Image (cartoon, rainbow, N blue to C red):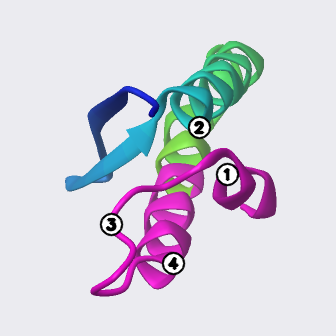
Amino acid sequence: MKKTTNININGIAFTLDEDAYKLINDYMISIRSHFKNKNGGEEIISDIEARIAELFQGMLIDTKQVINVDDVKKV
């Protein structure tokens, strides 16, 4: 059994298992670090988050409500 964490991406709530949360959190930290001082960086980060949310939504169905590490790797 794994712990889960609820997060908000682009205004949409998702539940991730602990491994998936660590992976996506590390990724977003690196993205923010890379784009933080670039012209248009905030917009790029926002676009990336929106696309991640869109892909995560497509992975959830009635019988699957938690994003796992394999889902994050696909994204």
At horizontal 45% and vertical 34% (from top left) the residue drawn is: 1
Question: According to the image, label 1 marks what residue?
Answer: 72
At horizontal 60% and vertical 39% (from top left) the residue drawn is: 40
The correct choice, above or below, for 62 with respect to 74 in the image is below
* Residue 72 spot, x, y in % from top left: 67, 51
State the quadrant of the C terminus: bottom right
Question: According to the image, label 2 marks what residue?
Answer: 20
Mark-to-mark CA distance, 2 and 1: 6 Å
Question: According to the image, label 3 marks what residue?
Answer: 65
Residue contact between numbered discs 2 and 1, judged by CB atoms under 8 Å: yes
Question: According to the image, label 4 marks what residue?
Answer: 59
Identify which amino acid the numbered label 4 is placed on.
Met
Identify which amino acid the numbered label 3 is placed on.
Gln
Residue contact between numbered discs 4 and 1, judged by CB atoms under 8 Å: no
Badge 1: residue crowd in 10 Å (few <14, some 14–19, many ≥20): some
Q: Secondary structure at mark 1?
A: helix
Magenta segment:
48-75
